[in-house]
Image: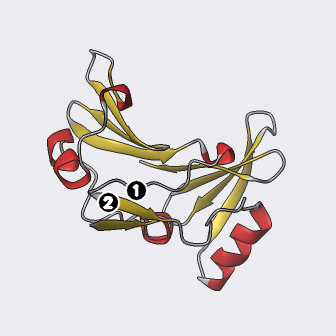
């Protein structure tokens, strides 16, 4: 079984063996086919497949976005018969901005902080351009990689 590590995904933009630019067919061979309700094709070249809260977006059959924007409702953990997510520091508890920034400091990761959507969200952008969003209560909300 493959294990995708959130630590590697966030800090190194590495979710090997999945790579940006892969086709949907290659990704689903590695991760398994999502159920019918977890695949959306807009008919204009955009296809989204979803494993738990983890979304893989393909444009013209090339992987170009990985995200999870359901973290505030507990969509961190996922496992099927092909792969599982190692949740790193996140575990089963809510992660707050200060906890995350302390972890980044331990790992010597540079970052910037911006308030977006009129202060509704706090965006932590890592030096590798990975985006981590927190809600206005400073609770982890989303992970975005593109």
Helix, strand or loop at mark 1? loop
> Could you tell me residue 80's position as x and y percent?
34, 53
Distance from the alpha carbon under mark 1 to that under mark 2: 6 Å
Q: Look at mark 2 in the image and give the residue it sits on.
A: 83
The answer to which image quadrant residue 104 occupies is bottom right
Asked whether residue 22 appears in the rendered view, the answer is no
Asked whether residue 70 appears in the rendered view, the answer is yes
Q: In this view, does 82 lie to the left or right of 4?
A: left
Residue at the top extreme of this rendering: 43
Say which residue appears at 62% left-offset and 48% top-offset.
71
Task: Please report contact status of discs 1 and 2: CB closer than 8 Å, yes or no.
Answer: yes
> Could you tell me residue 96's position as x and y percent?
76, 61
Dot 2 crowding, Cα within 10 Å, few <14, some 14–19, many 20+ = some
> Could you tell me residue 73's position as x and y percent?
66, 43
Say which residue appears at 26% left-offset and 57% top-offset.
82
Q: Quadrant of the N terminus?
A: bottom left
Q: Is residue 10 left or right of residue 120?
A: left
The answer to which image quadrant residue 43 occupies is top left
């Amino acid at each position: 079984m493959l294990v995708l590590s959130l630590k590697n995904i966030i800090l190194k933009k590495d979710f090997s063996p999945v790579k940006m630019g892969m086709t949907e067919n290659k990704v689903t061979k590695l991760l398994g086919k999502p159920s019918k309700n977890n695949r959306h094709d807009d008919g204009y070249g955009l296809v989204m497949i979803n494993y738990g809260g983890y979304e893989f977006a393909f444009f013209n059959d090339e992987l170009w976005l990985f995200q999870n924007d359901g973290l505030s409702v507990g969509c961190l953990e996922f496992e099927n018969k092909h792969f599982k997510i190692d949740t790193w520091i996140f575990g089963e508890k809510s992660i707050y901005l200060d906890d995350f920034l302390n972890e980044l400091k331990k790992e010597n990761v540079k970052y910037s902080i911006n308030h977006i959507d009129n202060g509704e969200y706090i965006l932590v952008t890592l030096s590798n351009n990975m985006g981590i969003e927190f809600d206005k209560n400073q609770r982890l909300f989303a992970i975005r990689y593109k």
